[in-house]
């Protein structure tokens, strides 16, 4: 998780993130194979078969919403994201949920920041978040806010990236330049230490390597750009010469394996519970 130096840096960073995902809203679902793999695995960790009030944090295009609705049957169901265009796409693709009567859990969409939730204390029985937390700036603020909005006995179920994700990109760039090309992610142990500092009880945690395979290096990079996930924090210059790009592609091609061009992620799957007292 990146760290901002002050409020102005934080505002600029979050605006960048929102703009990236705004631009990717129309192409996201076509390229989100990795996101779907992680989401399907995270669903297996849902700790209950019903939750009265549910919030999907960082909903994106709303890929989780139908399953959450069917599995948990909430009477209060909300989806939050920093990107307005992502929410519009989610609203369109989940129109059947938004058309339900309010007493049957009609879905509401909120454009907002997970580090400053626009909800009252103890508002939700279950908070769900898949591959969104790595874009937040201050882990302690994030987990404290999620804790505040969770009812006693309620759950936070999430996936996020950890240290060691996308090593192939870093390896391919070695010797070409010294700029960062992959964001820095926390170790699982550090992540769990942060949640316990915010009073969460850990009910389940695991770290999994999730490999994705592509026919060409360009396809691996497009899998990031087309879902809005190519923003590298603290990178001073996002421009790249054609010769440098060609060198990178050549280096990445040398990492080809039997199944194709690899791009591996380290993904944490975590279930937390807020104590009842």
Image (cartoon, rainbow, N blue to C red):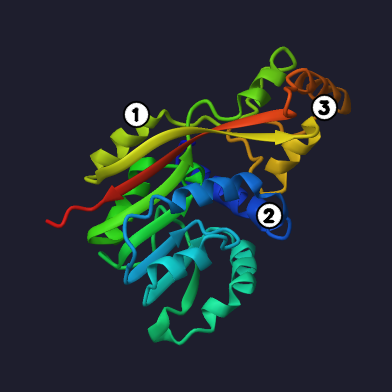
Please tell me which residue is depicted at 88% across the width and 28% down the height of the picture.
242
Q: CA distance from mark 3 to mark 2?
A: 23 Å
Pinpoint residue 96: horizontal percent, then vertical percent: 57, 79
- Pick the quarter of the image with the C terminus: bottom left
Pinpoint residue 67: horizontal percent, then vertical percent: 49, 64
Q: Secondary structure at mark 2?
A: helix
From the viewer's perspective, tell me whether residue 199 is left or right of residue 72. left
Q: CA distance from mark 3 to mark 1?
A: 35 Å
The residue carrying mark 1 is 189
Binning the other alpha carbons within 10 Å of mark 2 as few (below 14), some (14 to 19) or many (20 upward) gives: many
The residue carrying mark 2 is 28
Q: CA distance from mark 2 to mark 1?
A: 31 Å
In this view, which residue lies farthest toward the front?
258
The answer to whether residue 116 is above or below residue 199 is below
* Between 165 and 64, the one nearer to me in the picture: 64
Badge 2 or badge 1: first in the primary sequence = 2
Marks 3/2 in contact by CB < 8 Å: the verdict is no
Q: Secondary structure at mark 1?
A: helix
Q: Nearer the viewer, mark 3 or mark 1?
A: 1
Binning the other alpha carbons within 10 Å of mark 3 as few (below 14), some (14 to 19) or many (20 upward) gives: few
Is any part of residue 104 visible from this angle?
A: yes
* Between 266 and 6, the one nearer to me in the picture: 266
Pinpoint residue 188: horizontal percent, then vertical percent: 39, 31
Mark number for residue 245?
3
The answer to whether residue 199 is above or below residue 72 is above
Pinpoint residue 193: horizontal percent, then vertical percent: 29, 33
In this view, which residue lies farthest toward the left?
277
The answer to whether residue 268 is above or below residue 126 is above
């Amino acid at each position: 998780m990146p760290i901002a130096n002050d409020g102005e840096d934080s505002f600029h960073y979050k605006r960048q993130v929102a703009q990236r995902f705004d631009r990717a809203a129309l192409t996201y679902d076509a390229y989100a194979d990795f996101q779907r793999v992680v989401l399907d695995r995270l669903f297996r960790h849902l700790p209950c078969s019903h939750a009265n009030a549910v919030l999907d944090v960082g909903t994106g295009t709303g890929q989780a919403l139908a399953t959450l609705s069917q599995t948990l049957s909430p009477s209060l169901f909300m989806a939050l994201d920093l990107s307005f265009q992502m929410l519009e796409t989610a609203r369109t693709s989940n129109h059947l949920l938004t058309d339900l009567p309010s007493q049957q859990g009609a879905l509401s969409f909120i454009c907002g920041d997970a580090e400053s939730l626009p909800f009252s204390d103890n508002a939700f029985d279950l908070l769900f978040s898949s591959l969104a937390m790595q874009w937040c700036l201050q882990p302690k603020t994030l987990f404290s806010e999620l804790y505040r909005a969770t009812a006693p006995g309620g759950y936070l179920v999430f996936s996020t990236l950890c240290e060691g994700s996308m090593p192939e990109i870093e390896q391919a760039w070695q010797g070409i330049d010294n700029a960062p090309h992959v964001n820095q992610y926390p170790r699982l142990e550090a992540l769990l230490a942060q949640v316990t500092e915010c009073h969460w009880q850990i009910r389940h945690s695991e770290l999994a390597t999730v490999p994705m395979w592509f026919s060409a290096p360009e396809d691996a990079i497009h899998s990031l750009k087309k879902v809005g996930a190519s923003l590298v924090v603290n990178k001073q210059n996002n421009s790249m010469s054609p010769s440098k790009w060609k060198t990178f592609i050549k280096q990445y091609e040398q990492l080809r394996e039997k199944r194709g061009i690899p791009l591996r992620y380290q993904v944490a799957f975590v279930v937390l519970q807020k104590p009842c007292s």
